[in-house]
Amino acid sequence: MRIMNFMRKFVPLLLLLLLILFVFHAWFLPGLLSTFDFLYYSPNMMKEAYLNLYAWDWHISFDGFARFFSPYSWIFPLIFTPQVLLGKYLGIDWSVIERIAYLYPYLFLMLLSPIYLIKYFFPKNRFFLLAVLVFSFNTYSLLLAGGEVFLALAYALAPIIFVLFIKQTSKKSLMLSFIIGIVLSLQIMFDPRITYVTLFAIGLFLFFVICHLLYRKKVRTVLDILFYVLFIPGFVTVLLQAFWLIPTILYGKNPVETLGSAYSASEAAKYFSFAKFENTISLLHPNWPENIFGKIYFMRWEFLFLPIIAFSSLIFFDKKNKKDAYFILYFALLALIGSFFAKGVNDPFGYVYVWMFDYFPGFIMFRDPTKWYLIIALSYSILIPFTVWKTYELLKQQNKFLTKFKNTVFSLQNIFVVLVILVWLFTIRQTLFGQLNGMFKITSVPKEYLRLDMFLSSQPEYFRTVWYPSRQHFGYYSENHPEISTQVLFNIYDDKKLFNKFSNLTTKRLLEEASIKYVIVPYDSEKEIFLTDRRYDESKYQKIINGLEKITWLKPISMPSNCALYSTNCIFGKIAVFAVQHPKDHFWSSASHLNIHYSYINPTKYIVTVANVKKGDRLIFSESFDSHWIAIINSSNSKVVSSKYNGEFTSFILPQRGNYRLEVTYTPQSWVNVGEWISLVSFILIAGSLFISVLKVKILD
């Protein structure tokens, strides 16, 4: 009996830990982990990182140029802080930083979070470790962990946030409200879409709770719930997110709509609705296992067992235990709603999703409906262990005819549990056989990109690079040398149309005025860019190089096609580099008599000295036009408003002749500064209150 008790307590946990080590073994080995959807920062890139947040940044790339960035800066503290503290100051390699800052915290959360969830709702369920298997080892969560790590972290936080909100409906603690606000803010910084889905699940639960309380005429309790569960956590979250909320609200633009129709039109939702209802209710991601965009696989029969097991929990509906019954009904309903939304515009009733995308607040964020897989996984991590638990108890009671085995590992109930686990592992067998790529495989930065990194970072003057057709994720960029993708720049993804657009003289002028110094054709080492029918196509790469060689206003710097003849042309290996002959500086003018010198202070502030000015001369700033850029003439303290130049860039018409200095600033930065201080002070006060509260409890104990 002692051996049996030991096995029941520790063997399942040991096996789960072995599964984690087996699946994520690459995370414990030396070497870089990187994908197209995750980050890579070289030492030179980390040298230019900073902790300050700015309202103007080039990372959005609506059309390749910088824009008002605050609505999208919620994630930047999580990106820049590890870079600066660990990379810039301590000199730690990115392959180590990514593990410390992101990957190991994810492993901790993926183990803790589902256990916390099931232990809250069903503390007596001995099969609580199954919740980890269901929530953290399904096709959706594994694809997130294999590429979209920030999404995976937001996903892993969801069960904890869910339980904290539900717990607060009965506890009503001010300190717990503060904790909820902090954790919710962290999830928003990982991914606000996952936060929206999490809050939807919480809101549905609260709706039923409040309706029940109102039916029993407990209005005071409802008001307490609204105050402690919604108002205080919401207020704390707003304070902590003030660094981007304040400038976004004052600027007055919908962040998603500013991304363009590719993100905000209902046609985008139709295009991205890859999953069908049979996929979603079976917790099968449509791109499993290769995770190739747009490659949809047939339905697999083994996944049909998952909804059968999950919804079999309704068979064990016990009217005597109303609390458990309500929980099961709720999670069953939540699973159905999640399955309906995750299929997007596909049948049945796909028009409902289209209507919600167009009109329901916040739904415009979900052009990719698969984010709703979260609440399916959340529900199944409760329903499936519940079914296994109740079936185990039932078989144990009915196991009289196998008395010889009823108290051994070969008992009928134990065999049932093992079969369920084997079925689940069979659904993710590609993971066990090492067939997943992305963050599950060690990679390395090709030497070509290391050389390009040194070449670009060693040049102190400002310039941009344009990558044709798009940047490879090892490619160097910085604040001083931003990158642009030709596909994004022209919003053209057809190869022939893109080359025709790129090769004309109008484009030559645009590149020069945009301060673009180099045109780069990437070495597609990861086989992600040059694809035909989702397979790597070397001929597309070679065709682009051959075409660019014929453009007379481009000067070849490094040509892979000439490697056999001229070794000097091979310094970047298979990366082709062309120089634009006459690129403009960051500040320039068409007036030849005008002398310009400028100093970079930060992305939202420059000091520009102009000499030999004639009234009416135009100073051109090669950034996207935004009326919030202004120039202050220091000598007279007069303001020069910005105007659009050539349909694209910001410019200033100088109002007086002579020599003087201009302070060029982006005014929304003042809103960001205010928001930063509000967020920082709020965090210090809230964290301090929590610390004092914990200290008081320990002293009293």
Image: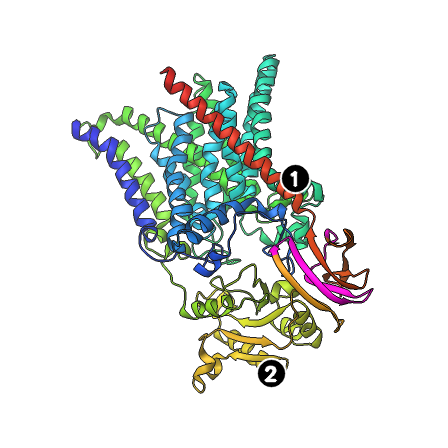
The image position of residue 696, as x and y in percent, is: 42, 19
The residue where tag 2 is placed is: 550
* Residue under the image location 60 percent in, 15 percent down: 215
Residue under the image location 81 percent in, 67 percent down: 614
Q: In this view, does 264 lie to the left or right of 32?
A: right
Q: Give the range drawn in magenta.
A: 601-629
Residue occupying the far top of the picture:
217
* Quadrant of image for the N terminus: top left
Q: Are marks 1 and 2 in contact (CB under 8 Å)?
A: no
Q: Mark 1 points at which residue?
A: 246
Q: Which amino acid does label 2 sit on?
A: Lys
Element at label 2: loop
Let me know if residue 544 appears in the view: yes
Residue 557 position, x and y percent, is 52, 78
Give the number of the mark in front: 1 or 2: 1
- Residue 625 in magenta? yes
Quadrant in which residue 592 is drawn: bottom right
Residue 329, relative to residue 520: is it above or below?
A: above
Q: Is residue 75 magenta?
A: no
Q: Is the magenta stretch mostly helix, strand or loop?
A: strand
Quadrant assignment, res 519:
bottom right
> Mark 1 or mark 2, which has the lower sequence index?
1
Q: Where is residue 265 in the image (x, y as percent from the top left)?
A: 68, 51
Position of residue 224 relative to residue 579, above or below, is: above
Place of residue 204 in the rendered image (x, y in percent of width and height, measured from the top left): 57, 29
**Label 2 neighbour load within 10 Å: few <14, some 14-19, many 20+:** few
